[in-house]
């Protein structure tokens, strides 16, 4: 999957003759987003055009509603891995800023259309973009008609009669409700620890690993959790081991059993 930046988009160089895309923060991503991804991939396969995602390094709410934002569900690294696994051909990752938030929705769509020559766009019914959220589904529908685009606005996806949203998932993580979190995501919740600095020391039962909480991902309440730890060596070879994670105040603690020696870097922790 080819990854582009906002600078690549602004260059105005059309990189595809045609494409099918969806646009959004896609923090998770979760099952509500999956319906959009499926629509884009289906159009791509039927019409033999590249499938793409236009997304952001963080949810736009992290900038425009910073005081209400509790943190990210995923990192860009994990998001890109997931999107590539679904079969997308390209992804444009925009570092959302106050400058970008002031661009009119129609102007933003013009920039994207010039960049990838989108012929099809799928969004959710709650879609908004542009300055003061000036472009919603109605405006996007009109924009599509004027510019000869195919357009789909998909119904919301429900979980136990409640709309699946990133905010819903953040709340579930904050409560430590991982059965719900994993159902809403459609896969286990994962924390990217590739940049964490782990400290280790021997204990009576094995190896004790600790690290400060860093990054922008959200953590569950203090407590003990069943997790799978993914480790990678310098050549990128990965292996997994199951253990217990202790979330304590501002740091994390893992106890690695003697029978599962750890000689590799911890790249992610997945909650069961």
Image: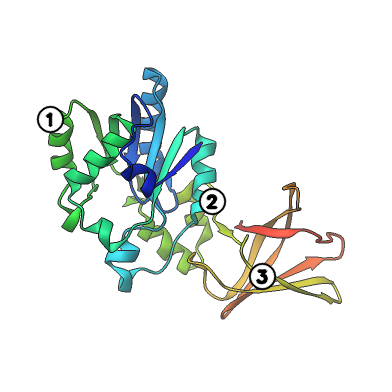
On the image, the x and y values in percent for residue 207 come to 81, 70
In the picture, the disc for residue 146 is: 1
Q: Residue at x 21, y 53 (%)?
A: 103
Secondary structure beneath dot 2 equals helix
Q: CA distance from mark 2 to mark 1?
A: 36 Å
Q: Nearer the N terminus, badge 1 or badge 3? A: 1
Which residue is the site of mark 2? 78
What crowding class fits label 1: few (fewer than 14 Cα within 10 Å), some (14-19), or many (20 or more)?
Answer: few
Front-lying residue, 250 or 179 = 250
Which quadrant holds the C terminus? bottom right
Query: Is 113 above or below relative to 256?
Result: above
Snapshot quadrant of residue 44? top left
Q: Residue furthest bottom?
A: 249
Foreground label between 2 and 3? 3
Secondary structure beneath dot 1 equals helix
- Marks 1,3: beta carbons within 8 A: no
Q: CA distance from mark 2 to mark 3?
A: 19 Å
Front-lying residue, 143 or 138 = 143
Q: Residue at x 40, y 58 (%)?
A: 58
Query: Is 264 above or below relative to 1?
Result: below
Which residue is the site of mark 3? 197
Front-lying residue, 100 or 124 = 100
Q: Residue furthest top?
A: 47
């Amino acid at each position: 999957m080819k990854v582009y930046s906002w600078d690549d988009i602004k260059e105005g160089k059309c990189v595809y003759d045609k494409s099918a895309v969806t646009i959004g923060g896609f923090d998770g991503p979760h099952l509500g987003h999956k319906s959009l991804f499926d629509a884009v991939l289906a159009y791509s396969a039927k019409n033999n055009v590249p499938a793409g995602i236009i997304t952001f390094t963080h949810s736009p709410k992290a900038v425009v509603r910073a005081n209400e934002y509790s943190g990210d569900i995923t990192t860009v690294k994990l998001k890109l891995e997931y999107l590539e696994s679904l079969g997308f051909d390209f992804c444009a990752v925009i570092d959302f800023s106050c400058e970008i938030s002031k661009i009119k929705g129609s102007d933003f769509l013009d920039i994207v259309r010039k960049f990838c020559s989108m012929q099809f766009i799928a969004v959710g019914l709650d879609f908004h973009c542009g300055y003061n959220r000036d472009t919603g589904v109605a405006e996007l529908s009109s924009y599509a008609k004027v510019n000869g685009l195919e357009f789909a606005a998909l119904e919301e996806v429900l979980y136990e009669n409640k709309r699946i949203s990133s905010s819903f998932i953040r709340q579930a993580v904050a409560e430590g409700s991982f059965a719900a979190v994993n159902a809403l995501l459609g896969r286990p919740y994962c924390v990217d620890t590739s940049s964490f600095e782990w400290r280790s020391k021997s204990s009576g039962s094995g190896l004790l690993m600790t690290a400060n909480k860093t990054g922008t991902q959200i953590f569950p309440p203090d407590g003990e959790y069943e997790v799978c730890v993914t480790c990678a060596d310098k050549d990128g070879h990965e292996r997994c081991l199951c253990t217990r994670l202790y979330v304590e105040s501002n740091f994390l603690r893992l106890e690695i059993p003697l029978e599962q020696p750890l000689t590799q870097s911890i790249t992610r922790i997945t909650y069961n």
